[in-house]
Each structure stands twice: as structure tokens, then as C-alpha cells.
């Protein structure tokens, strides 16, 4: 469970649940959905990622990777979205979002979703959508490089610095990873309403935002009828409407 000690000590005084999040962040969508499912009150600290509001000394002092979301529960700082939703389900167990008798399998779906974020999801989203609309100034890039200590993230963002851009090779690599994962998800959803069976769990919460964001970027989900059926049915849930659509009605138009 990703609990950290922040250098920005002001957040350790916060009471209740506070969420630093971005409207277009699929990782933030997971946490917002979980909070809605749990019926938990929370204080919103929204960061506009398109305006690079996360690139600041203040926020890097809360989350050392400069990423959203960050959840603070009575002054304790939690990072990494799948770790956060697993924490929320343990700390606030009613209603439960675990798969009865198959918890390890469910957690494996969370780990898989997390593992493809930087090598596949982010490059595909940036190449098809974000880099067309958002560029860092030289000053913003310099500030990011000074603050960011995570080498994987530094390498990723170096491809979006100055005149650099994600190209066909990056997209092809991302597509290979995504195709393998979505083929696995397609098979898992055969004759199932949810990833773990009939019960809505954290596994669905982890993967639904990926579908929402990637389909908004033009990913060809038509080859996966089970995924389309699953996403279409779960799109009527209140947590989907409040956790995703309320903040980002249409990712294709961000």
C-alpha cells in the first residue's frame, strides 16, 4: 500500500478525506468512482493537468511523482490509484468491492492495469490526443525536470519536450501491449456481467476508466464485443456518472 511521508507538511493537518485529482486522469476516475460507491464525503482539490497545475513545488511536496490522484485521509498521504482504491475498500468496507473467494485474482487485474499505464496507456493517449493540444514551454519543462526524480517518468516526458513527439514506433509498441491486455479482458468477460463474475468489484473500477479514455482517443474497441457490452452496461452506474462523466463528459473533446 503506497503511503508516503510528504515534504509539504501542511497536508498532514487535513481532516477527513481529501482528493487531489485531474478531470481527464483515468487514475483519478478510479478513485472518484470508489468514493461514490462507498458513499464517502470528500474534499476536492482539482488540478488542471492541461494547465500543468501539478507542476509546482507545493504539489510535488505532496506527491513526489507529481501525479494525480493523491488521497489524504486524516493527514495520511496515499498515492497510486489502484493502491488507493484497495485502501479505501479495506478502510471503509461497506459496501464491499472485493471478489468473494477470488481476491487475489481481482488484485491481479489491478496490478495489470497499473503495469501498463506508463508503457502503453500514456504513450497512446499522448500520441493520439494530448500532444496535439498540450505543449510544455521551455520554462515548464525545466521546472518539471527539476522537480521530477522518477527516471521512468522523466524519460516519458522527455518525448513530449520542445519539438519532440511520440511517433509511430511508440504507438505500435503501446498497441501491442494494449491488444494483449484487452484480449485477456475480452476472454474474462465471456458470459460475465463484470470482470469477476456477477459482482461489481475494484477490478471493474480499475478498467472502466481505461476504456473511457482510450475509446475517446479512437482505440478500436469494436473488435472486443464483450468489453463493449460490459462498459455499456456499467455506464449506467451512478459512480460512473459522478466519478467520470461529471468531470469529463467526453474525452475525445478534451
Image (spheres, rainbow, N blue to C red):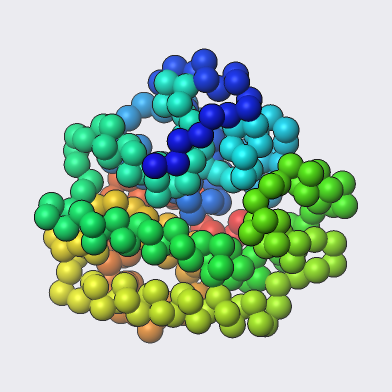
- State left or right for residue 22 relative to residue 105: right
Among the 4 quarters of the image, the one containing residue 105: bottom left
Name the foreground residue: 96 vs 242: 96
- State left or right for residue 146 relative to residue 26: right
The number of discs equals 0
Among the 4 quarters of the image, the one containing residue 73: top left
- State left or right for residue 113 relative to residue 194: right
* Residue 81 image point, x, y percent: 44, 47
Looking at the image, which residue is at 85% across and 62% down?
162
**5 versus 103 height, above or below:** above
Quarter holding the N terminus?
top left
Name the foreground residue: 111 vs 25: 111
Looking at the image, which residue is at 57% across and 80% down?
173
Looking at the image, which residue is at 68% across and 29% down?
58
**82 versus 253 height, above or below:** above
Looking at the image, which residue is at 63% across and 27% down?
7
Name the foreground residue: 124 vs 77: 77
* Residue 153 image point, x, y percent: 65, 56
Quarter holding the C terminus?
bottom right
- State left or right for residue 55 relative to residue 66: right
Q: Residue furthest right?
A: 138
Judge whether residue 200 can be spotted in this image. no
Judge whether residue 177 can be spotted in this image. yes
* Residue 235 image point, x, y percent: 32, 57
* Residue 206 image point, x, y percent: 37, 55
Amino acid at each position: 500500500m503506497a503511503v508516503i511521508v510528504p515534504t509539504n507538511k501542511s497536508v498532514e493537518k487535513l481532516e477527513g478525506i481529501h482528493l487531489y485529482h485531474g478531470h481527464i486522469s483515468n487514475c483519478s476516475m478510479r478513485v472518484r468512482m470508489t468514493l461514490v460507491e462507498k458513499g464517502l464525503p470528500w474534499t476536492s482539490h482539482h488540478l488542471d493537468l492541461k494547465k500543468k497545475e501539478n507542476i509546482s513545488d507545493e504539489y510535488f511536496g505532496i506527491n513526489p511523482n507529481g501525479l494525480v490522484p493523491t488521497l489524504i485521509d486524516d493527514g495520511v498521504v496515499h498515492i497510486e490509484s489502484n493502491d488507493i482504491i484497495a485502501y479505501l475498500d479495506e478502510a471503509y468496507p461497506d459496501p464491499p468491492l472485493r471478489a468473494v473467494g477470488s481476491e487475489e485474482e481481482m488484485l491481479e487485474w489491478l496490478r495489470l492495469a497499473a503495469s501498463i499505464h506508463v508503457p502503453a496507456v500514456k504513450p497512446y493517449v499522448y500520441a493520439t490526443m494530448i500532444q496535439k493540444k498540450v505543449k510544455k514551454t521551455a520554462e515548464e519543462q525545466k521546472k518539471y525536470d527539476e522537480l521530477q526524480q522518477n527516471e521512468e517518468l522523466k524519460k516519458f516526458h522527455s518525448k513530449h519536450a520542445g519539438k519532440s513527439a511520440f511517433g509511430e514506433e511508440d504507438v505500435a509498441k503501446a498497441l501491442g501491449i494494449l491488444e494483449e491486455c484487452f484480449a485477456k479482458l475480452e476472454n474474462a468477460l465471456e458470459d460475465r456481467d463484470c470482470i469477476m463474475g456477477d459482482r461489481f468489484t475494484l477490478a471493474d473500477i480499475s478498467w472502466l476508466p481505461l476504456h473511457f479514455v482510450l475509446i475517446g482517443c479512437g482505440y478500436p474497441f469494436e473488435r472486443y464485443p464483450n468489453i463493449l457490452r460490459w462498459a455499456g452496461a456499467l455506464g449506467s452506474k451512478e459512480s460512473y456518472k459522478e466519478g467520470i462523466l461529471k468531470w469529463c463528459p467526453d474525452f475525445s473533446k478534451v
